[in-house]
Image: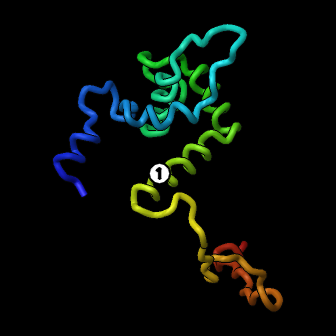
């Protein structure tokens, strides 16, 4: 429910784009991202800018090449997206957010039971082939001179 307090908490004025992360969102997301390597070249772009760029593409639906110039280069952002996707980071973020929401609602973080509806479970078809009718030819096609 939207109250003045929740509106202030989720206010996005002052951000470049509506998809940019606010500080509270970044505080939840940052520990779930891969740590910077100890050796090798330092990262050229801040992780938060890359996350903002990924969320911009996902929210706006634009192509990677159409990423605005205010973000890191699209190849860098796409490479990070693929790395996070293939590394299961998005699934970990989703799991973590679900647990946080369950705790916020006053429930245990992990559910103790699950319900599977028999209507949604796929089963094998009983019996043989389904009855089908043969396709009819049109009269115009069969009336050849």
Question: What residue sits 57% from the left and 35% below the top?
Answer: 32
x, y percentage for residue 84?
64, 34
**Left or right of 100 in this view: 127:** right
Q: Residue at the location (72% across, 87% down)? A: 133
Which class describes the residues within 10 Å of circle 1: few (<14), some (14-19), or many (20+)?
A: some
Q: Quadrant of the N terminus?
A: bottom left
Total numbered labels:
1
Most extreme residue toward the right is 128
Side of 125 relative to 101 (left or right): right
Residue located at (42% from left, 37% from top): 60
Residue on which the image places disc 1: 100
Q: Is residue 129 above or below residue 106?
A: below
Residue 59, compared with residue 33, is above or below; it is below
Mark 1 element type: helix
Q: Is residue 33 left or right of residue 136?
A: left
Hey, which residue is sitting farthest left in the picture?
4
Spot occupied by residue 39 in the image (x, y as percentages of width and height): 72, 11
Q: Choose between 145 and 67: the one closer to the eye.
A: 67
In front: 52, or 60?
A: 52
Which sits in the foreground, 93 or 18? 93
Rendered view: 142 above or below 69:
below
Q: Position of residue 71 (x, y in %)?
A: 46, 19
Q: Position of residue 69 (x, y in %)?
A: 44, 16
Q: How is the image coloured?
A: rainbow
């Amino acid at each position: 429910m939207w109250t003045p307090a929740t509106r202030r908490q989720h206010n996005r004025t002052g951000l470049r784009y509506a998809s940019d992360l606010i500080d509270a969102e970044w505080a939840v997301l940052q520990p779930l991202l891969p740590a910077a390597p100890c050796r090798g070249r330092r990262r050229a772009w801040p992780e938060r800018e890359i996350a903002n760029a990924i969320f911009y593409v996902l929210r706006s639906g634009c192509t990677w090449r159409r990423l605005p110039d205010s973000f890191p280069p699209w190849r860098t952002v796409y490479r990070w997206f693929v790395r996070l996707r293939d590394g299961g980071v998005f699934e970990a973020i989703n799991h973590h957010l679900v647990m946080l929401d369950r705790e916020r609602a006053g429930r245990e973080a992990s559910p103790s039971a699950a319900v599977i509806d028999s209507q949604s479970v796929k089963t094998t078809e009983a019996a043989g082939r389904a009855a089908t009718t043969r396709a009819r030819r049109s009269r115009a096609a069969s009336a050849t001179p």
